[in-house]
Amino acid sequence: HFRPSPGEAAAFRSAHNLGNRPFLLAVGSLTLDKRYEFLLDALAAFGSAAPPLVICGDGSLRSHLESRAHELRVEVRFLGFVSPGELPGAYSAATCFVHACAIETFGLSVLEAMSCGRPILAVRGGAVPEVLDATGLLAPGHDPQAYARLLQQLLTDQGLRTSLGLAARSRAIERFSLAHMQQSYSEAVESA
């Protein structure tokens, strides 16, 4: 289900009036643990040059985050809940995927973005570094300025974005595909 799809990317951009502009994508509930304020602070460092942040997800912090984005003059599109069928288009359309949760126990949205071949910038923490395993960029979880510097590098280097996206997709298929998981479970049961 999650794979690069130019057709679904174009449909997502059209449905949400995104045009051809670069944009960042975040997917997840609007809760404290997802640390959207950290992302907003990092984007504020770009000033008016910041690409828009598109967030697929909803939650109790939405009105607070809308106010904070307005206060920081950061362009954010809050799409609310996006159906699972539309998510591959969202990932495929994004210039890169951004993630700031430092306590993630796995990072399903990170894996979905990897499967769609997106370059990823996340914070070091939780299980995300293990899931990415050098196929994305990792910033310190306490330093929005360092995150902004890595994001700037990612946004200005098309070759880096391409190579990270390809590496992420390969890792997702090799390590997290259903076939790989079935084989691992089968081996574990047989050894027990």
Image (tube, grey):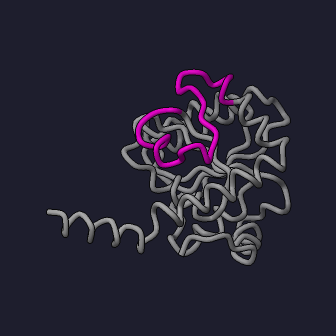
Which image quadrant: the C terminus? bottom left
Res 103 seen here: yes
Magenta extent: 124-147
- Residue 77 seen in this snapshot: no
Which image quadrant for residue 13? Answer: bottom right
Position of 184 with respect to 151 (left or right) is: left
Residue 32 position by quadrant? top left
Q: Tell me where residue 188 appears, x and y as whole percent.
A: 23, 63
The x, y position of residue 168, in whole percent, is 61, 55
Residue occupying image coordinates x 59% and y 49% = 26
Residue reaching furthest to the left: 192
24 or 60: which is nearer to us? 24
Tell me, yes or no, whether the highlighted magenta stretch contains residue 130: yes
Q: Is residue 180 left or right of residue 145?
A: left
Instruction: Check if residue 162 falls in the magenta segment.
Output: no
Q: Position of residue 151 (x, y in %)?
A: 72, 36
